[in-house]
Image: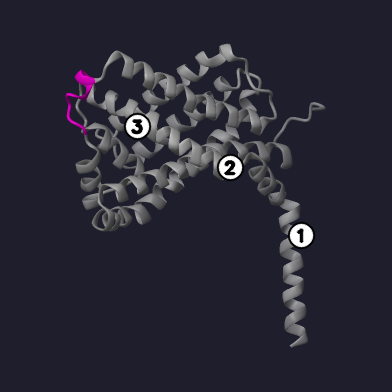
Amino acid sequence: MGTSRHAVNRLGRTVQHGWERLGAHTLVRQGRDLELLHRATGFAMLALVTLAPLLIVVAAADPLERGGFALWLADGMGLSGRSARLLTDIISPPRKVIGTTSVLGGVALAVFGIALGGSVQNGYERIWGLSAGPWHRVWRQAVWMIAMTAYLYQEVQTRSLVTGPERIALSSASGVLFFWWGQRFLLGGQVRWSDLLPGAAATMLGLVGLRTFSHFVFTPLIVTNAISYGAVGVVLVVESWLIGVGYVVYGGALFGHWLLAHHGLRRRTGE
């Protein structure tokens, strides 16, 4: 009995020592200081009320007619079968949405969309310990939103052009490039390209993991929620997925910064 207790205590000390040596406690503390879950929830709310309507308009105006916004969303979440059809039935708007979108509505979408870009920029600035950018940098947030819409658009267009390993490679490369450029652009070039690459790669890996999780968990959950709660249940699943996306976007950048600070990836330049 005493020997077993001693072995357990020794294992506990070994795990604790490895945890501290790895620096994981620092990563956890930084995530708590950043209010990672709170930011991810805010990201999901802004994405639902700004990015989703914007993408609906873009999808409705798509001259290639690749299935509309619901198909975009189903592809991003990794849904298939009945769950994808339910999402399409609930979310797909009529094509005349582009004709009924007023100029004022478009301006409102742009303004609130910039708020999403501002939220992501503020998160990146907090991660890197930078002061908030001046108000006239709002154009960066607008350009970032346009670039993200273009990135999501090309992700959907390549769905029917390439499949299998080729699409995985193309999607991974374009995702890393977008998040690499996005950090650099929103931070106003204050952080070196080489320092931002680990965070971009971690973000893309996180999105791949989230898509896999969504395929196995959210696919049956959408069907169950649709039966129990109707359209509201489906929207709740989509919102939960968006929270996961926000968590990965901020968490990936934070993980990249942690790697640089605690595992010798930062150049020794006396910083």
SS for callout 1: helix
Tag nearer the camera, 3 or 1:
3
Q: Nearer the viewer, residue 140 or 202?
A: 140
SS for callout 3: helix
In the orientation shown, which residue stands out farthest toward the right? 270
Between the C-alphas of marks 3 and 1, the distance is 45 Å
Between the C-alphas of marks 3 and 2, the distance is 22 Å
From the top left corner, tell me how far across and down residue 172 is, in percent: 43, 36
Q: Nearer the viewer, residue 44 or 147?
A: 44
Q: Name the residue under label 3.
A: 52
Q: What stretch is highlighted in magenta?
A: 93-100
From the top left corner, tell me how far across and down residue 24 is, in percent: 68, 50
Residue sitting at 26 percent across and 49 percent down? Answer: 80
SS for callout 2: helix
Tag nearer the camera, 2 or 1:
2
Left or right, 68 with reference to 126: left
From the top left corner, tell me how far across and down residue 13 is, in percent: 76, 66
Left or right, 148 with reference to 225: right
What kind of residue is marked 1?
His
Q: Mark 2 points at which residue?
A: 36
What kind of residue is marked 2?
Leu
Is 97 contained in the magenta span? yes
